[in-house]
Amino acid sequence: MSAFGKFSIQTAYKRVHGLGSAGAGTEHFWRQRVTAVALIPLTLVFVVVVILATGKDYDAARRLLGNPFVALSMLLFVGAGISHMRIGMQVIIEDYVHEDVPKIALLLLNTFFSIACGLACAYAILKLSFGG
Amino acid sequence: MADSQVRTQRPLSPHIQIFRPYLTMMMSITHRITGGALYVGTLLLVVWLLAAATGRSGYEHVQWFMGSIIGRLILLGYTWALIHHLIGGVRHLVWDVGLGFGPEARENMARLNIIGSVVLTILIWIVAYAVR
């Protein structure tokens, strides 16, 4: 109950808005669902790409990964996947690490690792696509 | 607050080690573990794509490792974790729209998740070996 007790005309939503565990709302919850839905078809495409690449030599693998449709699918897969895994790991850290300093350190590491992995994948895909 | 005394005397919620293991609980734990494994497994994708973008000898080294017994075991584990987490994610999306909470539905979805992940993993590997 707020300072006005049960006589407040504030709605329940207004009282809790922005007061989630991270001081934010449900952005992460929703983004995790959006990326999950996107990852259903993208993961299937990713599996097909990997299957097609197995056993191929270097030139054939480069041609495959440099194909615009393959490259775009892989970029979408990496983007959605990295965002999804970063939020997922953040939840795990917040569930098990309760001391401020290790928690903040791990959350930072999670962010750095995710962005580094995402950029590395995107850079490699683009380089393969543009024939560098 | 009048009820603060009552609130402090409430029993604490038992944690997982108190409960007898049951299927949906194990599935929840497995979903988190596979998610964490896929997080680390992203490094495989980074290494593979960067190797392809870097050059022939690097790519051939990576291909050699992925084709070794250890590499294949890691990729097999990655495939299963990916498919299990994917189906588990669909299960969560079904719950998100308010379906599948009944005692039979949730058990059946859990069983379907286990069986589906194993069957699809085997199928993916059969196809991968067939097309190479």
Image: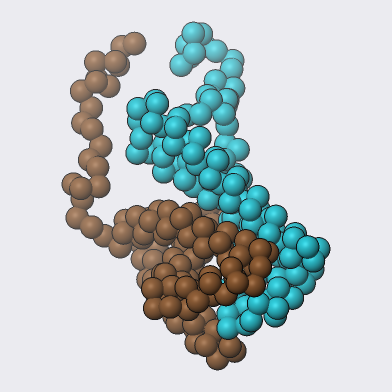
Chain colours: A cyan, B brown
**Is B13 drawn above or below residue B98 in the view shown?**
above
Whole-percent x and y of residue A91? Answer: 45, 41
**Is B101 drawn above or below residue A68 in the view shown?**
above
- In the drawing, does residue B26 fall left or right of residue A47? left
Residue drawn where x is 51% and y is 58% of the image: B43
**Is B32 drawn above or below residue B127 in the view shown?**
above
**Is B32 drawn above or below residue B76 in the view shown?**
above
Q: Residue furthest bottom?
A: B130
Whole-percent x and y of residue A112? Answer: 55, 40
Asked whether A31 or B34 is in front, the reply is B34
Asked whether B17 or B129 is in front, the reply is B129
Q: For residue A40, which quarter of the picture? A: bottom right
Tag count: 0
- In the drawing, does residue A70 fall left or right of residue A29? right
Q: For residue B128, which quarter of the picture? A: bottom right
Whole-percent x and y of residue B84? Answer: 45, 67
- In the drawing, does residue A34 fall left or right of residue B28? right
- Quarter of the image with the N terminus of chain B is top left
Judge whether residue B103 can be spotted in this image.
yes
- Quarter of the image with the C terminus of chain B is bottom right
Asked whether B12 or A41 is in front, the reply is A41
Q: Residue furthest front?
A: B57
Whole-percent x and y of residue B34? Answer: 41, 59
Q: For residue A72, which quarter of the picture? A: bottom right
Residue drawn where x is 51% and y is 29% of the image: A22
Judge whether residue A41 can be spotted in this image.
no
- In the drawing, does residue B47 fall left or right of residue B80? right
Residue drawn where x is 18% and y is 46% of the image: B18
Residue drawn where x is 71% and y is 73% of the image: A62
Asked whether B80 or B101 is in front, the reply is B80
